[in-house]
Amino acid sequence: MVFSSLLFLFRFLPVVLLGYFLLPKRFRNLFLLIVSLIFYAWGEPKFVFLMILSIVVNYLGGIFVDRYKRKDNIKGAKVALIISAVIDLGLLGVFKYTGFLFENVNAIFGTDLISKIVLPIGISFYTFQMMSYVIDVYRGDTDAQKSIISFGCYVSLFPQLIAGPIVQYKTVALELDERYETADEFASGVKRFTVGLAKKVLIANNVGALWETVSAMELESLPALTAWLGILAFTFQIYFDFSGYSDMAIGMGRMMGFHFLDNFNYPYISRSITEFWRRWHISLSTWFRDYVYIPLGGNRRGFAIQLRNIFTVWLLTGIWHGASWNFVAWGLYFGVILILEKLFILKLLERLPRVFGHLWAILLFVYGWVIFALEDMGDILSYTKALFGGNGVAFDTQSLYLLLNFALLLTIALVASTPLCKKLFEGLEKRLPKTAYALSLVLVVMGILLSVIYVMASSYNPFLYFRF
């Protein structure tokens, strides 16, 4: 598929930007809707009609909810909300979970039901976006969008269409109707896009090669050092891959006058898992908080209900990520940890030196990526055994070879996953603004050139979160 190649994006983006700025403002939403649908259809031609159907359903859902509410017909508004939500979740369920259901039925009953169903790219992201819109109209948090062109533009906007962040309509409602593009904002967007591009291409792709090597080995004989190198590689790969795409989406949006909220805030410096999930995939955490956790009662109906709500949210979070038992286990893993932190661990960590909190969080989220990355439960157990020396081998010559070859890259990834570079540059901006400006210009040019060279030389450039 075309989304496996960044070369297409490099060719697509300049043409879109040129057309966008040449058109009068009143035609720009229509233009973005058309090019976004083309962008999606280029990789998933048969599923673009599914997206158009979803756009129409939720546009009408918002219109009818708003109409009934204006007539004080709350029952009618609720029915319109339920119908749109059922269709949204029904489509998501059919394409994302039917195969998983049939696969398990086949395993239990020995049947031969079809279990391979192609998953439309980005369906989890755009489905949640549309659901949040209709819910917010029902709650009165935003007005219904009267223009199906503007609503379709919001849903299909190509920068964040296929891998997030999940953009709530109320955060961009004003910019859909009236936005202002400036040279400074465009330059800021280019800079943010380049940072994301470099994260993905120069760090995630390269460190991912280590994970690909380790995960392909015989897990039952994997040395402990090799296992740790592998999962640390995946830890950095998924962060720089996903945060890199989010930065690219935010940057592209900013070039055209949209301001998407940040999706990551240096999660690997967290001192608890509670803090980690405030910093990682913020748009998803916010969505579950606003549309699941709080409606279930949040923390307002007693401690027992709060713990139940946390457990429910994290079960659903795991299921959202994929139709596989490892994602269910991954969601429950973090749900249990968050409950334990809420019960007593956070209070304990507050009394201990900060380093203990960092170690606690790092060990737990790194191991969480083992559950996330390996779909087979048997492989997860084998990898866990290897991590803790259960195979009887601490390291071998290949472990040392991999360590020597990837030590520098892992160190760069470690430093880049902290706010150190950002703070150093901000300090330079305060003391020597002209030098900082010149340096940022050089880094942007170098980042784009190096990334383009790498992409042209490599045939494998997928984004990990496309499959969600």
Image: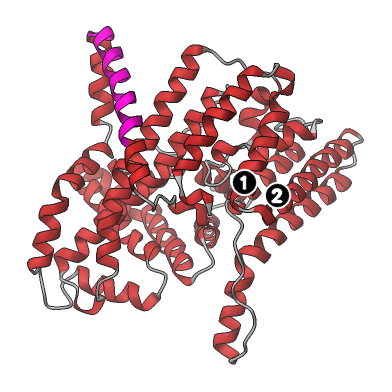
Does 390 appear in magenta? Answer: no
Q: CA distance from mark 1 to mark 2?
A: 9 Å
Magenta stretch prevailing secondary structure: helix
Task: Work out whether residue 467 or residue 89 is closer to the camera in this orientation and state it.
Answer: 467
Residue that label 1 marks? 40
How many residues crowd mark 2 within 10 Å: few (<14), some (14–19), many (20+)? Answer: many
Picture layout, residue 105 above or below residue 258: below
Along the line of sight, which residue is nearer the eye, 389 or 346? 389
Instruction: Report the span colored magenta.
Output: 432-450
Residue at (24, 43) in percent of width and height: 413
- Residue that appears at 80% across and 31% down: 147
User: Closest to the observer: 374 or 11?
Assistant: 11
Labels 1 and 2 touching (C-beta < 8 A): yes
If you read the primary sequence from the N terminus, does the residue marked by circle 1 or circle 2 appear first?
1
Residue most extreme to the front: 457
Q: Is residue 295 placed above or below 339 in the rendered structure? A: above
Q: Amino acid at mark 1?
A: Tyr
Q: Is residue 27 rendered to the left or right of residue 414?
A: right
Percent position of residue 57, x then y: 79, 48
Circle 2 is placed at which residue position? Answer: 51
Asked if residue 255 lies left or right of residue 53, the reply is left
Q: Tell me where residue 447 sits by quadrant.
A: top left
Amino acid of disc 2: Met
Above or below residue 208? Residue 436 is above
Residue 119's image quarter?
Answer: bottom right
- Using residue 36 as the reference point, say whether residue 442 is left or right of it: left
Tell me what residue is drawn at x 58 percent, y 48 percent: 125
User: Is any part of residue 300 visible from this angle?
Assistant: no
Mark identifier at residue 55 = none
**457 on left or right of 259:** left
- Is there any visible trace of residue 225 in the rendered image? yes
Q: Is residue 442 magenta?
A: yes
